[in-house]
Every structure is written in C-alpha cells, then in structure tokens.
C-alpha cells in the first residue's frame, strides 16, 4: 500500500489559513495533525481531538525522546506537534495536513522529506494588518509583533512548493485543492516511474 | 543583491549525471561544489579545483566543527562536501551545482531549504546495468552493489523537485536547463510577490 501524503501548511497569523482549511476539510478526506499541550483541558475539549493533553513531566519526557517536530512554551504551558500521530496516519495510507509555522515546517521537511509545503498569505501586509485589527482579539502591541513575524516569514516562500494568495476564501480553497491535486499527480507519475524503473511493470 | 540558487543533483552511479553536467556547464554559468578529501593529490590535481586537499587531522577537525553537508570514508580516506564554499558562492549571488547522493541531498535541503532538488536516472535498471558493464571499470560484485543502491535511491524520487530521465544526453541537458529555468521563474515570481507583500513595490 502507498503511504499517505503529508501536506504542511504555513503562513502568517491572520492569513485566513484556518478558515480555508476548515472549508477544505468539509469536502476532502484528510487527517489533521493534533497538537499536544501541557495546559489543562478547557470545558468541552476532548483529549485526542482538540489536543493531546499531557502532564508537564510527560511533555518533558517526550521532548527528551525527540517525539516532537517542534515545540514551544506560551504563558507557562508547553505546546508541540508530536511526530507519532502524523507518521502513523501516513503509514496507514492516510493523507495528513499539518498547520505549522515556518521554522517547524523546515524541521518537518527534514524528517518527512517527501512532504508537500504550502504557504498561504494575504495579498499584502496591509490587508493582513486590517484582518488582525478586524478580529478585535489582540492588542495593537501583539498585532505589531504578528506583522513583524509575517514580514520575516514571507522571506521563506522560496522554501515552499506552492504559494497560495488568500484574497477570497473560495478561491483559496480551490487553489489549495489544485495544489494538492498537482502534488498527487506528480507523486502518482513518480511512483509509476519507480515501478517501471525496477521492472515491476 | 539576490542570493544565488543552489541546484542539488542526485541519481544512481551510471545514470550519466557527470556527462550531462559537463555539457550543461559548458554553456551555463554555474559554480560547482568542490569536495574535500584527506587523500594525497594525484599528479595534475590542483587544490581548490579538483578537491580541497586536507590533512587527516584537518579533515577530522572540520567534522567536529560541523563544516560538512556530509562526509564518508572510502579506502581509508575521508571525502566530504564542505558547506563553506557553497554558502559563500550563494551569498555572492552565484548559482551553484552540487552533485551528491540521496541522503546527502536531504541533509543539504535541511541546511539550505530553498535549494532545488533534481534527480537524474536511466530509464530503467537494465539500462543502468548495461552502462555500468559497458564502462568496464568495475567488477561484477561492485556493479551488483551499485544496482542495489540504485533500487534504493529511486524510492526517494518523491523527495525531489524534478525528475530527469536520461535516455539521450542532449535531451537530458535540455531537460536540466528547463528544470532550472522553471525553478528560476518560480523564484523570480516569489521574490516579486515578497516585495509586493512588503509594500516595497
């Protein structure tokens, strides 16, 4: 059986990745990578669905065992992307989507070199700023930080396989589908060649 | 000034990479990555052209300093791909080609994530076998080893950006040019977008 395809999605906070991904997943059968955290579950949050909830000591043991693609600490709690769930689903032949920031994406690529890297962003920094302000959830200080991060992140676009400019959600969903379809066609063609090369067909 | 582009070329021994690359370089201005070795220079070999010749102790110090993309030992001598030459040429804005085997290529990708990975091979394993036998330079035992390595290497094709099937040298040279042209067009388009995103144009 063929392994599943790992799609790694990055892009600035406020780029609308989450909305696009949600719409994409309503129509497409992809597993979504689940983060682990050492914070307490909130009401209605389910272990293994929203997060893998871990005790601080468990999380730190996982760090020592190199069980994460990447991890970080926010507000005194650990957050990370465990390798195990992603690698198991790929082995089972399931396609997986992993939303992760730029440095983490490079890390994932080094561990799963046949993953497909997709970068999504707003058409420009001003639209990003408007969207972040429009959310009305962050202070101007946090927004300024996010904009600076975005300016640094876009410099990594050349490390990605596909760039999706999210100006309209429906078009961005279609572009995401097209990128994945294109990547799958390439893999199918390659796998066919590999079999032919080996004399299996 | 824009950084140069790093092209990483892999493919089985006997795939004709060397011949294709030689023809390509006659017409295209690329720097070629130079290997380092701890073996004695042969007559006519020039330091910094054929190889960077190093004393064993120097080579081992470079290993300790993490100065290589990858290194290995053959017949009691070290061979490796130093990072410094490649990274300096890229910084100067020069395009660089690096011929390296599959594992090394994955290593390079993790250090230079915007490099372009190109895989070159014969159309099938039997043609590879014929070419290796035709060279008349290796024992059947060595040839069998190389064929087994080739069968393992082609499984990595999906980790590469471009696949070139070398059935005819001139066509393979043209395919290599086209792949690089395509990669450069993508980078130019991305860099343009990055400037637009940041409001610089």
Image (cartoon, coloured by chain):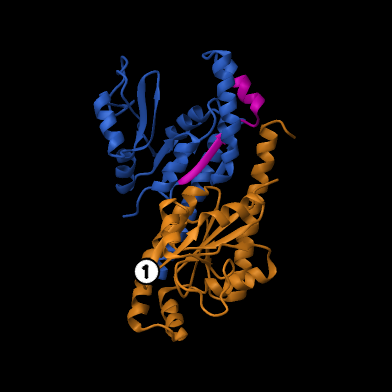
Chain colours: A orange, B blue
Residue B179 seen anywhere in this rendered image of the structure: yes
Give the image location of residue B16, x and y in percent. 54, 27
**Residue A18 appears in which quarter of the rendering?**
bottom right
Judged from this view, the residue extending furthest toward the right is A201
Give the image location of residue A154, x and y in percent. 41, 64
Give the image location of residue B81, x and y in percent. 36, 34
Is A28 left, or right, of B116 in this rendering? Answer: right
**Residue B136 appears in which quarter of the rendering?**
top right
Residue at figure coordinates x 45%, y 34% from the top left: B100
Residue B166 seen anywhere in this rendered image of the structure: no
**For the residue carrying disc 1, how many other residues have a C-alpha within 10 Å: few (<14), some (14-19), or many (20+)?**
few
Q: Provide the residue span drawn in magenta.
A: B116-131
Is A32 left, or right, of B23 in this rendering? Answer: right
**Residue A77 appears in which quarter of the rendering?**
bottom left
Location of mark 1 (residue): A149
The N terminus of chain B lies in quadrant = bottom left
Does B85 lie within the magenta span? no
Chain to which mark 1 belongs = A
Nearer the observer, A62 or A85: A62
Local secondary structure at mark 1: helix
Q: Is residue B114 above or below residue A119?
A: above
Q: Is residue A163 above or below residue B86?
A: below
Nearer the observer, A105 or A133: A105
Q: Is residue A168 above or below residue B110?
A: below
Give the image location of residue A14, x and y in percent. 46, 75
Nearer the observer, A97 or B112: A97
Residue at figure coordinates x 51%, y 78% from the top left: A42
Q: How many marks?
A: 1
């Amino acid at each position: 059986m063929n392994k599943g395809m790992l799609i790694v999605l990055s892009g600035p906070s406020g780029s609308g990745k989450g909305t696009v991904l949600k719409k994409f997943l309503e129509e497409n059968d992809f597993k979504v990578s689940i983060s682990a955290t050492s914070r307490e579950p909130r009401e209605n949050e389910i272990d293994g669905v929203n997060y893998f909830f871990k005790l601080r000591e468990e999380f730190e043991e996982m760090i020592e065992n190199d069980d994460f693609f990447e991890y970080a600490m926010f507000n005194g709690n650990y957050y990370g992307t465990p390798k195990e769930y992603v690698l198991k689903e790929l082995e089972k032949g399931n396609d997986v989507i992993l939303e992760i920031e730029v440095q983490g994406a490079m890390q994932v690529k080094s561990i799963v070199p046949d993953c497909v890297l997709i970068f999504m962003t707003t058409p420009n920094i001003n639209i990003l700023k408007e969207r972040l302000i429009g959310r009305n959830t962050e202070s101007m200080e946090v927004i300024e930080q996010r904009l600076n991060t975005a300016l640094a992140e876009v410099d990594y676009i050349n490390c990605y396989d596909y760039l999706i400019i999210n100006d309209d959600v429906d078009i961005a969903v279609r572009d995401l589908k097209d990128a994945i379809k294109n990547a799958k066609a390439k893999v199918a063609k390659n796998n066919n060649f590999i079999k032919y090369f080996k004399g299996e067909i």
